[in-house]
Image (cartoon, grey):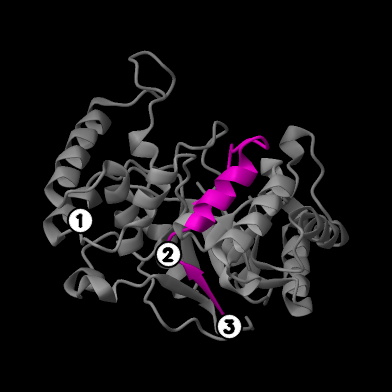
Amino acid sequence: MTEKRAGRGGATLLASNQPNDHMELPMSSTPKTFNLNSNTAIPAVGFGTYLISNDDAEMAINAAIMAGYRHIDTASGYQNEETVGAGIRKGLQSAGISRADLFVTAKLWPGNPAWGDAPKTGTQTIEECEASLARLGLDYVDLYLIHAPYGGDMRLEQWRALLELQASGKARAVGVSNFNQSHLEEIKSAGLPMPDANQIELHPWSQKPDLLANMAKHDIAPIAYSSLVPLSTWRVEDGQDSAKTDDMKADGTAFKGMAQKYGVSEAQLLLRWGVQNGYAVLPKSLNPDRMRQNLDLFSFVIDDADMAQIATMDRGEGVAWASGDPSK
């Protein structure tokens, strides 16, 4: 029988992209945190660190914390944990806040045999978390994730190791990233506690309604990455691999019009779409003004008609991974 951990309660996490109760509430009622378990809540807006260089990371993290971010998302695979940790320490000091005021997510790289990278064992998983903590200069992380479902036969052993890390206090919450329904059902079938969260690519072109419905059934919180893919400047020329289609280009015109309607940037619109659907989001910028702008998502609400229009833009799989959406 599958063990159930304490329910999250608090904000309702939605399993569809249809208009929802959040839009019928005053703007101040839109949740600014989403509960992961009975002891841990994740800020609705975090700061992503993927592809931030070691030259920029300390400055960027400090600036983000000073701008008001209270969630920093990193991973061993980003190869910047030491400088992210330095930025966290500097930011805490600059903002005059304590470690308990900041939510930090880290991730295990599970290995990938297809890339010649042997899957981590349970023991190696614990060692990897401890190494990340040392690089970050932290005693614990608020959320520790398996970065992708590439562990194969070791996937369940890795998950058991994460549960050990949570029990030991080295991770307040544990979860997965890029897991699809079959990967989640594997955990359930083994009779293990389900993840607190699943961090997946989510934006209007990859809305994943079936996966989100399955996650809602198991009380797994969605965390969105690559929320701003529709604004990307890559693959825009005809003839490029996976070039933007005419429909995608038309969507871009719609996003621009909606953003003008609400008096916000297109990035704010896309990020608000995620938060309004119940997803924590992870924007990234090295520009302090844009950092603050991306954090300002609670002064407007996307109306029902625009939410319904965005719901029609789903194109299926994500596009952020060159090797294909791991959660497909």
- Where is mark 2, residue-wise? 44
Q: Is residue 168 above or below residue 174?
A: below
Q: Residue at x 34, y 35 (%)?
A: 231
Q: Could you say which quadrant of the image residue 173 lies in? A: bottom right
Q: Is residue 313 visible?
A: yes
Identify the magenta region.
39-66
State which tag comes first along the sequence, 2 or 3: 3
> Looking at this view, is 321 or 300 the one in front?
300
Q: Residue furthest top?
A: 239
Q: Above or below — where is 142 with respect to 40?
A: above
Q: Residues within 10 Å of mark 2 (few under 14, many from 20)?
A: many
Q: Quadrant of the N terminus?
A: bottom right
Residue 75 at x, y percent in the picture: 66, 50
The picture quadrant where one finds residue 16 is: bottom left
The tag on residue 307 is 1
Gap in angstroms between the C-alphas marked 2 and 1: 19 Å
Secondary structure beneath disc 3?
Answer: loop
The answer to which of 229 and 317 lies nearer the viewer is 229
Residue 28 lies, with reference to residue 200, above or below; the image says: below
Relative placement, left or right, of 145 versus 313 is right
Name the residue carrying label 3: 39
| Residues packed near mark 3 inside 10 Å, few (<14), some (14 to 19) or many (20 plus) | few
Mark 2 or mark 1, earlier in chain: 2
User: Circle 2 — which element?
Assistant: loop
Q: Secondary structure at mark 1?
A: helix
- Disc 2/disc 3 C-alpha distance (Å): 16 Å
Residue type (three-letter) at the residue carrying disc 2: Ala
Residue 74: x %, y % from top left = 63, 51
Q: CA distance from mark 1 to mark 3?
A: 32 Å
Decide: few, some or many residues near mark 1? Use Cα within 10 Å; few <14, some 14-19, many ≥20. Answer: many
Left or right of 39 in this view: 107:
right
Q: Amino acid at mark 1?
A: Met
